[in-house]
Amino acid sequence: MDLWFTEHHSDNARFSMKVKEHIFSENSEFQKINILDTYEFGRVLVLDGFLMTTERDEFIYHDMITHVGMAVNPSIKKVLVIGGGDGGTVRELTRYSTIQEIHMVEIDEVVVDASKEYLGFTADRLSDERVTLYIEDGIRFVKESKEIYDLIIVDSTDPIGPGEGLFTTEFYNDCSQILGDNGILINQNESPYYSDTREQMIRATSRLKEVFPIVEVFQSHIPTYPSGHWIFGFASKSLHPIKDLKIEEWESFGLKTKYYNTALHQGAFALPTYVREMLK
Amino acid sequence: MDLWFTEHHSDNARFSMKVKEHIFSENSEFQKINILDTYEFGRVLVLDGFLMTTERDEFIYHDMITHVGMAVNPSIKKVLVIGGGDGGTVRELTRYSTIQEIHMVEIDEVVVDASKEYLGFTADRLSDERVTLYIEDGIRFVKESKEIYDLIIVDSTDPIGPGEGLFTTEFYNDCSQILGDNGILINQNESPYYSDTREQMIRATSRLKEVFPIVEVFQSHIPTYPSGHWIFGFASKSLHPIKDLKIEEWESFGLKTKYYNTALHQGAFALPTYVREMLK
């Protein structure tokens, strides 16, 4: 059988990968969850028809959503991850022996369970003893939390469906309340190329700027995401992602990373002119 | 009619765009040439089934293949373009009033004529009086030339078909012979992600290093190319792409560019670790 999974990047552009096996399919309370084994990209997680994680290039996404914040403040001890049900962000965080507590809040238990079962390459560190997993709504968790975090990572789906509330000013305000003075928020911030994700990127960035004095975005090459040009947001009350980068301190962790390095960290904030201009 | 053009990025991954109109089709002596009008990307040039140029994102490719070299040596006066039949590289070069001569050597006249007819957005400066167009084999041209150039841009197809000889040590040696002491060679240098282009990138870079003392590669986000992560090579006898970057001189040209800027120039050379390692 010649089986292909196709994602529409826009009405008029689409990307397809050949499927070896359809491993898992379930409609949870929140979304349609599918896991496929593909020839080119290994196992892939698909939520509501959108590709979230691939075995082949998840390292790029998870390096960039984790290490950029850690290299600006290597003293981070307590981290909140919103979303990130595949476990890849937590996996990268657990590599820092200096991190003491990781709270992960994922709305959809089915994603976590399926990832543990089929996506061990990302989910295998969810059992780390520093990790507490909360299966609940991240928006409510942040609103009601009395904790203070050093780092919040918003590892969400696109702002349609369950991820929508994670792109609002109110949510960013609530995050700000539970971030320390040197706190950093990193979010997956969509993409400048296709019109839907472009509007989402512009809106999310402008909302972050309403709440945080320092907001910059940085880019990465993620081949399986629409356009391959994917953006993350960096927001902080006091730390600047380049001026406060601690190159030597980060290097002293001795982490081997496949995508991230401190030179690339700096380069990632150098945006193309057309992206700069749409974020002005 | 629901008409789609599909490019295979590998045996198991493909990218498709919806076609409004099939505008042009001809088999030249060298290759199959098609021009399509598409909904998402405007007019696109396809050679032997591979996407070469799109109206939507050609600015990225042409900015990066032209301005990086010009910003390292803003005194460049005489330029050789090998390939580049769509005219986009020449268009960017003609924006510098300081450039006195541009020789463009394209093997396939059909590409040039079709571009002039249907791709005015790239081809409209081929009539600039500083441009001399040679319809001949770039390999032979370089071998036999008695000129000395400040900049050679190898704006080729992939190293299969007519582009193959433009990725050899012999060709780079011949280029070196006709480059001045401050000469720079820039080439389109394939991509690290899919296996075919990865091997081509590694081989081309290592051959450049056999010939030139300074070789660095730089990256760009070109959404319609396979993986969206596209690499260019920078080679020179004496100039380093970062240490010798002339920010103020380049800014003084006052060029408006949609992708390139001098901060991005520096960032583009900061490669992901996995790309660095494959080029070691």
Image (tube, coloured by chain):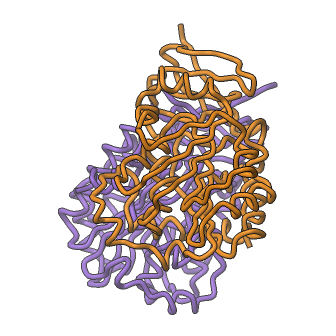
Chain colours: A purple, B orange
Q: Quadrant of residue A177?
A: bottom left
B124 sits to left or right of A96: left
Q: Residue at x 54, y 56 (%)?
A: A221
The correct choice, above or below, for B245 with respect to A227 in the image is below
Whether residue A203 is visible, yes or no, is yes
The correct choice, above or below, for B191 with respect to A264 in the image is above
Q: Which residue sits furthest front?
A: B146
Q: Residue at x 54, y 26 (%)?
A: B17
Q: Residue at x 39, y 60 (%)?
A: A271
Q: What percent of the width, then of the height, locates residue B232?
A: 60, 57
Count of numbered tags: 0
User: The N terminus of chain A is located in which quarter?
Assistant: top right
The correct choice, above or below, for B256 with respect to A197 in the image is below
User: The C terminus of chain A is located in which quarter?
Assistant: bottom left
Q: Which one is nearer the viewer's eye here, B31 or B181? A: B181
Q: What percent of the width, then of the height, locates residue A49?
A: 54, 35
B156 sits to left or right of B195: left
Q: What percent of the width, then of the height, locates residue B179?
A: 62, 63
